[in-house]
Amino acid sequence: MGKSTIYENVLTQINNAADILNLDGQVRELLHEPMRTLTVSIPVKMDDESIHVFKGFRCQHNDVLGPTKGGIRFHPQVCEDEVKALAAWMTFKCSLVGIPYGGAKGGVLVNPKELSRNELEKLSRGFIQAISPIIGPDKDIPAPDVYTDAQVMSWFMDEFSKLKGVNTPGLVTGKPVVLGGSFGRHSATARGVMYITIEAAKAIDLDLNGATVAVQGFGNAGSFSAKFLHEQGCKIVAANDSKGGIYCKDGFNPVDAAKHKEETGSLKGFQGCDDISNEDLLTMDVDILIPAALENQITEDNAENIKARMIIEAANGPTTPEADEILFKREIMIVPDILANAGGVTVSYFEWVQNLANYYWSKDEVDRKLEEIMVEAFEKVYNTHIDMGVNMRVAAFIVAIKRLTEAMKARGWVYNDHKY
Ligand code: GLU
């Protein structure tokens, strides 16, 4: 049997929960296919005067709960299947944490590390122009994702505002504070990961003080998760990025490691650490494993060898359905992506609310409100996991699908007499 695609993995996740809910065909049908996917070609005049045409996508999965929401990634491996899957996960993520959004995602096939700043700006402006007919503060609101940041969001917002002749901060989230960004958005995904890790540790009776942690991926989500968990008393013993990994039995300071990465371009060679391969990092004997990179990292090929007591998915889609089953049998707790990394989109929601109101909150207010939402979502999922005897991912999808179904019923998209 060939390996399934990422979107096929999402369908399996939906069906696993839908089967338990005895979900009617209409709801499944609506959740199985995205509403729309726009494919665009973006011509960019490069620094050497040549024209390069980049390919990009914006997929809007489902908008029953509100305007669609989700990041835009710049990555050489972006494809339509991946963007569709990431858009679907956003639908379930937003539903799960109770914010009024549907799910979307975008991507451009590019290695941004190979572009000059000037080329990157042109590509960012070109992409937002190309998708401008289907986005807007009350339609679809982009945000950062893999290899995009506050600077790219600024170009998006500026270009769209010029195009429409209206200053539109609510078009995107993840902007710098000076342009209407929210305090706390930059590190929100990781702050959410921290709140969730605290709750999950309580649930499995793990003392975070001295608990060992391995982090796969050291971008925004990974590096800040390491920082926050270090502040909680955890010992960060391993981390990696696309260029290699570092390991230190006694733990290292993740803030210094991030500084080293910023200065040298990678974690490799960080003082006091040995090299470690990606496979060895994933199967290390640690208390907590945090995948914070890309999809399909924990698979049937390595799930038997995972030694962590719990896995907190800061990345989207790091674990395949086959690996899920193996890990559930082995009683390793996985806190699924749609719960664990929902802090990012939650603070994106706060940012958008502040933009629409033109009234800005303090960092404390943002953090407090984020904690409240994350803890409540964890409790809902954990209780469903215990009450129904299903794994945490199925439980998270059950909670999310119930809310989506209720909204579909209310809108008249599905029959009213349906059980859910
Ligand atoms: N890209 C992030 C995610 O996957 C954030 C999306 C957002 O803030 O809209 O959840």
Image: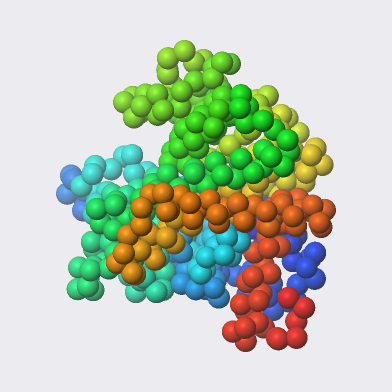
Q: How is the image coloured?
A: rainbow
Q: From the top left corner, tell me how far across and down residue 133 is, in percent.
A: 34, 74
Q: Is residue 235 left or right of residue 319?
A: left
For the residue pair 268 and 394, the one nearer the viewer reads as 394
Where residue 17 sits, quadrant-wise, is bottom right
Q: Residue at x 62, y 31 (%)?
A: 208
Q: Residue at x 75, y 57 (%)?
A: 384
The answer to whether any part of residue 220 appears in the image is: yes
Number of residue marks: 0
Q: Residue at x 76, y 50 (%)?
A: 391
For the residue pair 177 and 411, the one nearer the viewer reads as 177
Q: From the top left corner, tell me how far across and down residue 268 is, in percent.
A: 44, 22
Q: Is residue 322 above or below residue 236?
A: below
The answer to whether any part of residue 326 appears in the image is: no
Q: Is residue 299 above or below residue 287?
A: below
Q: From the top left corner, tell me how far across and down residue 285 is, in percent.
A: 68, 24
Where residue 267 sits, quadrant-wise, is top left
Where residue 310 sits, quadrant-wise, is top right
Q: From the top left corner, tell me how far across and down residue 339 is, in percent.
A: 60, 52
Residue most extreme to the top: 272
For the residue pair 185 and 416, the one nearer the viewer reads as 185
Q: Residue at x 50, y 68 (%)?
A: 101
Q: Is residue 393 left or right of residue 279?
A: right
Q: Quadrant of the C terminus?
A: bottom right
